[in-house]
Image (cartoon, grey):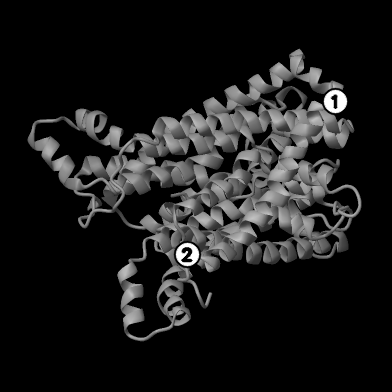
Amino acid sequence: MATIYNRSRTINWLALAPIFLIFVFVIAPVINIFVSSLQFESLNLLRTESTRNVVWFTTWQSLVSTALALTVAVPVAFVSANFKFKAQRLAASLISLPFILPSIVVGVAFLQILPSSFHRTSFALILAHVYFNFGFASRLITARWIQIHPHLDDAARTLGASPFKLFTTLTLPLLAKAITNAALIVFTFCFTSYGVVRVLGGPSRSTLETEIYFRAMQLGDVSGAMIFSALQVVIIAFLFVVTTKATGKKHEQSTRPTITRQIPLRTRKQRVVCTAIISSATAFSIVPVLAIAFRSMNTNSRFTTTAWRTIFSNPEITRSITKTLTYAVTSMSLATLLGLLSACSIAYGNNKFRFISGLTTLPIIISAVSIGLGIIITFDTQPFDWRGAQLMLPLAHTLVALPLAMRIISPVLEAIPDSLRQASSVLGASPRQTWLNIDFKIIRRASISAAAVSATVSVGEFGASSFLARRGTETLPIMISRLLSRPGDSLQSQAFALATLLVMFSLAIIFIVDSFTKDKFSRDSHA
């Protein structure tokens, strides 16, 4: 970092590591998937009715899930952006909890709280997807809503606008891009959902993501799996391009106003409405989590801690816990470092480095399952037979976490005024001293948040791990899935106990993120 302001060779070196990693372990495997799938006769699979049914089910359940998630998120965003109330930070943390939970934990939670008649149904999948995404969508919309200057509302009311007209003619157009971006990302998460569908779905509720795994790992039809993976990438990439073009030219106020929009709850109507919205959202967030904890201590219809004692005495499970934490530390370190390098190359470089932002988005577009499949079919021959290498799993986790890590750090780094650096230089500080005393101190909290979120992604990652995990290297999500697939109430309780451990880890991460960012997580991580 000593020559961070040398805008020639230094910036190139900063960008080299993340670019190399994305090209070698994301782009090259995806290209290999496309090339390989086009060479097989199984290309005819695209014409079958079963494929059309899978694509149709994946699409319509994602659309419905997205619409319902936004329906729940907008009222929560309205309250969060416009009012101050007691325990606001706690409520925000609890409402955000579902999104940071591992997807398999969400599936396990709804497996517990829903009657058995709803298991393996579209309703279960849609409800779980709404639960998983509404908190994230509300934070995205809140971040934009709170930027709208309150004087605009005052002017509209002075001109006689009713609350409904004010919302439809002023607020909603200003929120349009944020809502569209939230809808796009939520749709992508629902479209590429794996853990939730794996647990709650079934043969008749298969999506493209689960079909990729089923064909590759259960049927041994790798060529068919590659075709589904290629199809999924094409659909998501097309959607991103269309949405970006549609919203790219819309003007948005990008700076937060000096006067806050948030006001104390003054009237009884405000208190009733806000309490009802926040209480309902908070209850929706924590009830499934409490159900998991309750089930972990309920075996054969009686209260017992046997499952908890077993998971800490079973060598196979304790090894899984150790491996999970080891992979999390490795992935956290790599993702944070690469995210920092990517953010620095964008902030300090010229416009030609802007492509790195899109490049680091690829793991979200491609999905973890496709990344895992791409790695095992690309690096399967000498001298690059790396399928069984233990580094592959934390590396895949790093790729999945990198987009979030970079987007947490980048907005904070880009917002640092150049005048601070210039003043430091005038006072005789070297480039290294300037970076350590100015830039690093400002982005330190964002870096801690990026590290925490990256660790959470690694601990809960299930898609790529399903392909890359080997006997003796299983992570907790793999172990949970294995225990749920076995008969016996005691084994089921152990699965719920492990899921509770993941919930506790996620709660700790939420606390770290909100403590270090002071409610800026939503603006920084998904800007």
Name above or below for residue 509 compared with residue 179.
Answer: below
Residue at which label 2 appears: 446
Report, in whole angstroms, how far the alpha carbon at label 1 lies from the one at label 2. Answer: 46 Å
User: Do the numbered discs 1 and 2 sit on residues whose CB atoms are within 8 Å?
Assistant: no
- Where 323 falls versus 5 (above or below)? above
Residue at the (8%, 33%) spot, across then down = 159
| Label 2: which secondary element | helix
Whether residue 508 is visible here, answered yes or no, is: no
Of 260 and 351, the residue lying toward us: 351
- Tell me where residue 519 appears, x and y as whole percent: 40, 59
Please name the residue shown 35% across and 35% down the image.
249
Among the 4 quarters of the image, the one containing residue 463: top right
Q: Position of residue 477 (x, y in %)?
A: 74, 50
For this orientation, the residue located farthest to the front is: 8
* Dot 1 crowding, Cα within 10 Å, few <14, some 14–19, many 20+: few
For the point 56% across and 29% down, the residue is 238
Q: Name the side, left or right, on which 490 lies relative to 148.
A: right
Q: The residue under label 2 is which amino acid type?
A: Ala
Element under disc 1: loop
- The residue indicated by pointer 1 is 40
- Quarter-of-image position of residue 422: bottom left
**For marks 1 and 2 on the same chain, the one whose residue lies earlier in the sequence:** 1
